[in-house]
Amino acid sequence: MIIYKAKNYSDMSRKAANIISAQIIMKPNCVLGLATGSSPMGTYQQLIDWYKKDDLDFAKVTTINLDEYKGLAPNNTQSYRYFMDTNLFNRINIDKNRTFVPDGLESDSEKACNDYDRIISCSGGIDLQLLGLGHNGHIGFNEPGTAFEKGTHCVDLTETTITANKRFFSSEKEVPRQAYTMGIKSIMQARKILVIVSGEDKAPILKEVLQGPITPSVPASILQLHNDVTIVADEAALSLV
Ligand code: F6R
């Protein structure tokens, strides 16, 4: 595991974007696993800036997102598809047909998850998976207690996650209670994993992830067993490590 200490959020974002752009330059038709949330926004902005300067070409890149709320349509402003379109895809030269997010409108969970697992395997596997870290140690929507062996599945979101995500909705009542998420097994099958973590509020969980026991109670602790993980975290997030 390689750990890069960044000065702050923007330094973290630039370092993470450098790693992603190196991946795209080395393999223009690579498959990127992507995340939503506050952590990757600066990284995506940096990638957009480099694309605008002609330094990056997304024409052959495929992307596979980690998760989507069950029940939200792609054009719902709180859906993860909408987040990805507005924060990245609409602003670079990616072929939208090669951008994948679980289908929030598929009410048959088994079908939605099997379809998504097929998309991942047909893509040839993820070259670089970008991850944010939840305050409870979740990755994707794999909440504490999730079996490490799972592929894409439907989850009931925990109260911690609902509370953390309510800032994006007009009220807590509107936060969906279920989501489709790539499983830990799918995440661990990525060839490389890049985790970005920022802020003092993430310091206690980052310490557990890096130095604590490997346990389903801290889903991200499994990353200790992956052979190519890079953590880019700012000083505040690394303050307890
Ligand atoms: C998002 C995702 C989540 C977030 C995590 C951290 O697609 O899968 O696991 O990465 O909740 O969220 P932020 O970055 O908002 O702190």
Image: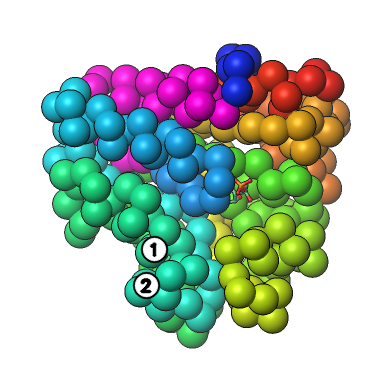
Q: Amino acid at mark 2?
A: Pro
Percent coordinates x, y for residue 67 in the rendering: 51, 59
Which residue is rendered at x = 37% and y = 50% of the image? 87
In the rendered image, residue 20 lying in the magenta stretch gets the answer: yes
Where 195 falls versus 165 (above or below)? above
Q: Mark 2 sits on what residue?
A: 74
Which residue is rendered at x = 79% and y = 20% of the image? 239
Where 217 falls versus 1 (above or below)? below
Which residue is rendered at x = 76% and y = 32% of the image? 200
Indicate the colouring scheme: rainbow
SS category of the residue bearing label 1 = helix
Percent coordinates x, y for residue 161 in the rendering: 72, 60
The quadrant the N terminus occupies is top right
Indicate yes or no: mark 1 CB to ligand 1 under 8 Å.
no
Q: Which residues are magenta?
A: 9-32
Which residue is rendered at x = 78% and y = 48% of the image? 136
Q: Mark 1 sits on what residue?
A: 81
Does the CB distance between marks 2 and 1 fall below 8 Å? Answer: yes
Q: Is residue 101 visible?
A: yes
SS category of the residue bearing label 2 = loop
